[in-house]
Amino acid sequence: MSESKNLVYRIATETDAESITTLINSSYFGEESNQGWTNENEIITGKRTNVTNVLNMIIDHNTIFLIFFGETDQVLKGCISLVNKSELKSAYLGMFAVRPDLQARGYGKFILSIAENYAIRNWNVDYIKLRVVIQRPELIAFYVRRGYIDTGFKEPFPIQEVKTATLLRFDLQLVTMSKCVRK
């Protein structure tokens, strides 16, 4: 385990799938998510993911989940997934979550930085990419402040991929954002 900012982290294993799923779902939807600033209650309801999806990501050899705990309490505080797209010299970020009651304390910046550095060190990537719901301007602004730019690539929200959720709006789109990490 590595440590910093009162968090320790490690790569998730199959035994972590259930706790990761709970963290992600509570960070994006439902009453608990209202404690934070990144919830999607106004645009989507249901669940962001399920244990099977998370487990499949954990066992995929091109994907890792980094999970973050309190330094002393060992309580899961955040997570982020990285997918290695070696043919594109890129890594894709996803499933980024910080416990709602801990948001706006700098943990998200820290987790994002650790994930970026992991991809740079271990996969020799030139770019880090992610997709964000366009109707979430506060989240887009967060990534812009971290050096990501709008690539101009937009696509409809893939509701068919998120079988555990229901759209409250049907105009949702995703924008791909990218950050060059090689100088």
Image (cartoon, grey):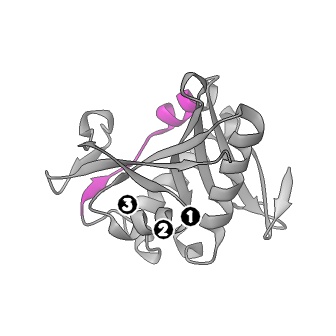
Q: Nearer the viewer, mark 3 or mark 1?
A: 1
Read off the residue under disc 3: 29
Read off the residue under disc 1: 146
- How much space separates mark 3 and mark 1, taking CA atoms? 24 Å
Which residues are drawn in magenta? 43-57
Q: Circles 3 and 1: CB distance less than 8 Å? A: no
- Crowdedness near tag 1: few (<14), some (14–19) or many (≥20) residues, C-alpha within 10 Å: few
- How much space separates mark 2 and mark 3, taking CA atoms? 19 Å
Q: Circles 2 and 1: CB distance less than 8 Å? A: yes
Q: Which of 2 and 146 lies nearest the eye of the viewer?
A: 146
Q: Which of 28 and 182 lies nearest the eye of the viewer?
A: 182
Mark 2 or mark 3, earlier in chain: 3
Q: Which mark is residue 73?
A: none
Mark 3 or mark 1, earlier in chain: 3
- Residue 50 in magenta stretch: yes
Q: Position of residue 30 (x, y in %)?
A: 36, 64
Q: Secondary structure at mark 3?
A: loop
Q: Secondary structure at mark 1?
A: loop
Q: Position of residue 62 (x, y in %)?
A: 61, 25
Q: Is residue 77 left or right of residue 103?
A: right
Q: Position of residue 137 (x, y in %)?
A: 33, 67
- Residue 110 in magenta stretch: no
- What residue is rendered at 61% in x and 52% in y? 79
Residue type for callout 1: Arg
Read off the residue under disc 2: 142
Residue type for callout 3: Phe
Relative height, residue 140 to residue 122 (above, below): below
- How much space separates mark 2 and mark 1, taking CA atoms? 7 Å
